[in-house]
Image (cartoon, rainbow, N blue to C red):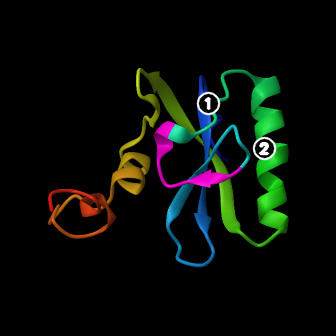
Amino acid sequence: MAKKIKGPQIILANRLDDGRAVFFTPKQNWSYQASDAWLAIDEAAQQQAMEAAMKSDADNTVIGIEFIGASDSENGPVPTHAKHIIQNTGPTVRLDLGYQAEGAGA
């Protein structure tokens, strides 16, 4: 039986075209950055966010839509579980490779 997440939540899914983790935003689109995510702090907001996100699932844009625990920071929402933090930031080895290196340096 799945555990119910308590507290603020954001919606995570995977894009079908490249498999990358994406987060549902208040503008009702998907972003690679958790800081852009729609932070649902109560059940009414969670229901509204999920209904909007499910439209993308029906459009075959994303798959595996789920709520994950999050906390609010001055830069926007951040995932609270290590697995989801890594999905947001990229691999934890060879920081010069992968999407976490995009836009860095050069």
Q: Residue furthest bottom?
A: 17
Camera-nearest residue between 61 and 106: 106
Q: Residue drawn at (41%, 21%), measured in percent from left and top? A: 74
Residues at discs 1 and 2 in contact (Cβ within 8 Å): no
Measured as percent of width and height from the top left, residue 53 is found at 76, 50
Q: Residue drawn at (67%, 28%), measured in percent from left and top? A: 40
- Mark 2 residue type: Met
Q: Is residue 67 magenta?
A: no
> Number of marks in the image?
2
Q: Residue furthest front?
A: 106
Q: Residue drawn at (27%, 59%), measured in percent from left and top? A: 103
**Separation (CA) of disc 1 from disc 2:** 12 Å
Q: Is residue 83 above or below residue 102?
A: above
Q: Earlier in the sequence, mark 1 or mark 2?
A: 1
Q: Residues within 10 Å of mark 2 (few under 14, many from 20)?
A: some
Measured as percent of width and height from the top left, residue 65 is found at 68, 56
- Classify mark 2: helix, strand or loop: helix
Q: Is residue 105 above or below residue 77?
A: below
Q: Residue drawn at (78%, 44%), measured in percent from left and top? A: 50
Measured as percent of width and height from the top left, residue 86 is found at 35, 53
Per the image, the residue denoted by label 1 is 39
Camera-nearest residue between 46 and 73: 73
Q: Which mark is residue 12?
A: none
Q: State which region is magenta.
A: 29-35
Per the image, the residue denoted by label 2 is 50
Measured as percent of width and height from the top left, residue 2 is found at 65, 46
Q: Is residue 34 magenta?
A: yes
Q: Residues within 10 Å of mark 1 (few under 14, many from 20)?
A: many
Q: Is residue 85 above or below residue 96?
A: above
- Mark 1 residue type: Leu
- Classify mark 1: helix, strand or loop: loop
Q: Horizontally, is 22 left or right of 59 in the view?
A: left
